[in-house]
Each structure stands twice: as C-alpha cells, then as structure tokens.
Amino acid sequence: MALSVRLQGRQVQSLVITPQLMQAIRLLQMSGLELERFVAAELEQNPLLEAEDGGEAGVGPESGPAEAAAPDGRGGDETSGHAVDAEPAVLYPEQLRPDTGWTPSPGSRASRPTFQQELGVDQTLPAKESLDELLERRVDAVFAAPADRGIALALLSGLDETGYLTAAPAAIAGNLGVAPESVERVLRTCQEIAPSGIFARSLAECLELQLAERGRLDQPMRTLLANLDRLASGQTASLAALCGVGRAGLDRLVAEIRTLDPKPGLAFAHEPVRTLVPDVFVRPGPQDDWIVELNDEVLPRLIVNNAYYARVSVRSNGADRAFIDECRDKAKWLKKSLDQRARTVLRVASEIVRRQEGFLVDGVAHLKPLNLRMVADALGIHESTVSRAAANKTIATPRGIFEFRYFFTGAIPATQGGEAHSAEAVKHRIRSMILEESPDAILSDDAIVAVLSREGVDIARRTVAKYRELMRIGSSVERRREKRLKAAS
C-alpha cells in the first residue's frame, strides 16, 4: 500500500465558549456589589460607554430567553437604558392571609423611595468608640508623668483584639529601658481604669479581674480559677473537694463564671455596617397575587454613545478605527449581557416565589422541597444557569431578606407515602421542639424522631442528630445540664 499526502475537509460540530460568552456567564453569577465594580471598570476603559442618569428600567419574565447566548454584537437599541421597559412579574393569584405584615407602597415604582431611603440605616447608626480610643483617653486623664504615660501606651499597643496583653511586661521594660517594677505598677493601674477584664495576661486573670470588680473573689473562687484545666476536663468531683464546696456549691461557682466575658475586647470591635441591598423585591399585589420585581438600585443603566462614535470614526483610520470599532462592539455586548442577566434573575426569582408561596404566607414550616433541576425544567433552561443566577443574590420578602439558595432545600420523605417535607422546615420544627422543652422533660433524639413520625415525617435518628449539630444545639445530656445550671442561678 502506497503512502501519500493529501488534504481532506471534514465538518465537526463542537461547543466553543467564546470570550463574550464567558463574560456573560461571569456577569450572571456576580452579586450586586461585584457587578457595580465591574461596570465602573468598564466605564473607565470604554469611551463609548456612559451611565444613564435617572429613568426607570424593568424586565419582564417573557421578554427573552434566559440562556446566555452569543449574539453577533451588532444591532439592537444602543440608546435605551439597561433593561427592556416592562411591568414586574405578577404571579399566580392565590388567597393571602391578612397577617402577612406587608402593605404595598402606594404609587408607581418611580414614586417609591429607594430601599436605603426606606430603612435610613446609614443615618440612624450610632457612632461607636473603639477600645484604643477609649483607653487612650483614659490614659491621658490618669497618668500625669510622661514616663508613666509612655509605659501605658506601650502596654496599650500590646493588646490584641480580645483585650488580652500579648506582650510580656519584662519585654516592654527592656524596650523602654525602665524597671520591670514600673511596668507592673502601670499595668495594675491600667487594669483598674480599663473595662473589666482588659489588660489580662491569661483567661484566669481576665475572669479574676471581673470577679474582683463584683466583690466575688473569695478563696473557693480563687481555687477554681487556678484549676480551670480540671474544670475543662470534667473532673468535677475532685475540683469540688479541692475548692472546699460540695457539688451544688461548685455548680453555683461555675454558673457565676459563665456570666463573665472571656473576651471583653470583642465588645468594642466593630466594622462599618454595610446595608444589605436585595436584588429582587417580592410583595403582595392588589389582586391577591405576588409581584416580583428587580431592584433598580443594583441594575446598571448603560448607554452606547453613537454620536461620539460617528464623530470619531470618520476621522480615524488604521489602528484607531479598529480600536473604536472594538469599543463599540464591547459596549453593545455588555448591554445585551446585562439585559440577559436581569431577565434570567427575574425568571428564576419568579419561579422560586411560585413554588414557595406557602413560605411567604405561613412561614418556614411550609417550605417545600426544591432543587435546581425543578426550576430549570420549569423555565426550559440549563441547571447550571439556575445555579449561577441564584449565586450571590438576595430576595426581599414580607418575612425578611433571604438568599436565593435558602429556598433550595432537600426533601425528607413522608410516612404513608404522603408529600415530602422540606429539610429546612424539618430543622425549624426540631429547633422549635427543643426551645419549648422544659428542664424536667428534655427530648432525646429518639423522642424527637417519634414526634416527627406522628406528624408524618419519616426521618432517622442520625439525621436528627446531624441537623441538631448543624444548628449548634447540644445533646439531651448537655441541654439538661445547661438548663439546670440556669435554673440554679
């Protein structure tokens, strides 16, 4: 058989993700803050992009397909706002109970105050003084001698965020060139003028300072503080004998220690409060229906400046003309991607509201099992698109602000072949039963399983234990001990 060289053409079908499609996918899963930063960067880089001032923009659920596609980057309305003008989605009229606690705002969306104007959070938050500011002010007022003030400020710089002194007094004395006795004297004064427990060098000293301020630092308490390791390991019998008190007396000492703050500095640690702005609003409509609409505050409105493009393009050639054409194509593609993102988010939110109407009316106990595939099949889109649309998004409902992911819960089978229960609703029921139990009737995991079984929930004991641990709820033995200590105190 002779070997030869020849050319052969074949048609092959393959899926190629273009850079534009990758950008659309990234936009879909961005949060409102991330989207704002991305658009701000694009406005700086692209001379043809401008932010539209004012105006109303909304997206209807039937204004276009939800899947991210790769348009050719040309055509469309370059002078319109971010999204297609349309009414918000109105979902499935159902009978609403009068106790939903939500009164629709009068007037149109243009006349309603914005989300932050309604809350006024940024204007009503009180200013907080940090721990460093408080201690510096007290140091200046107490220490008149410059040397003592310098030692106090050095001690202050050695505090960590919990209020503990991490630097050794001997090391501070060596760095400042002073006697260790001077540092110890200033440290004792600092412990007196600071909030109780600050400037402690250990947990035992922190608790000791707080108890001394209360006048409760007697000999049994001192012995207990010196043997906290025994308390942590559960050696209660030997510890009670060592303190010279009985088991009941030791329980009272431990109960008093539990009222102290082991990390007093954290009470002064605070970060700037950031207002959570939802991506979607849900409210009852005038005809016992649900109105789902996008939050205009997190929707960028962009304009492609065709007039500027026309003036520049006629005077450009070569590389300049290629650059301005590329900027125009990028601007048009970004507008289309933002419109597509808004439509997809609204469609997913509308389907979630339709399926979880019981939660909106009656609360967590009426959540239904829901997964990504159920929403994807209902909307005719891919499951990954639903996942990206639900990522980093929040929805404001009459019952509060929730992440989209909150409404996607697993299913717990029902007894006798009934309708399955939402895992989140079962967790809520377990939490409610535990909160209502009395110290003399603590429910074990088996008892909780029996109660849920009578209510039609087919659940295993290990599942109850797993849910309880996820909610950071102790076992029946731990809860019985804690409630008895609270009752004794």
Image (cartoon, rainbow, N blue to C red):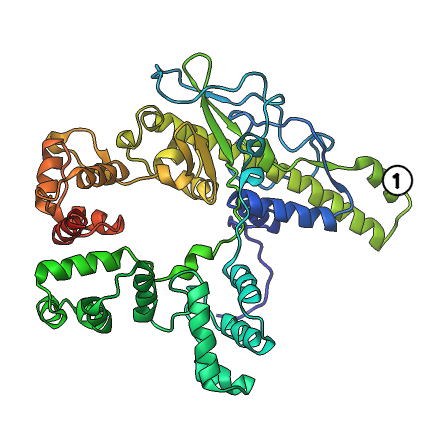
The answer to which quarter of the image holds residue 358 is top left
Q: Is residue 354 above or below residue 407?
A: above
Q: Amino acid at mark 1?
A: Arg
Is residue 204 visible in this depiction of the protein?
yes
Residue 207 screen position, x and y as percent: 31, 65
Frontmost residue, 373 versus 401: 401
Q: Is residue 199 above or below residue 176?
A: above
Frontmost residue, 48 versus 435: 435
Residue 85 screen position, x and y as percent: 62, 24
The answer to which quarter of the image holds residue 60 is top right
The residue furthest top is 287
Q: Which residue is mark 1?
A: 311
Residue 78 screen position, x and y as percent: 72, 33
The secondary structure type at the circle numbered 1 is: helix
**Crowding at label 1, few (<14), some or many (≥20) Cα neighbours within 10 Å?**
few
Residue 184 screen position, x and y as percent: 43, 79
Q: Would residue 78 appear left or right of 424 to someone viewing this image?
A: right
Is residue 72 visible in this depiction of the protein?
no
Number of marks drawn: 1
Identify which residue is drawn at 20% across, 67% down. Answer: 232
Q: Would residue 205 appear left or right of 13 to someone viewing this image?
A: left
The residue furthest right is 315
Q: Is residue 102 above or below residue 458?
A: above
Identify which residue is drawn at 46% across, 41% down. Answer: 385
Frontmost residue, 449 versus 29: 449
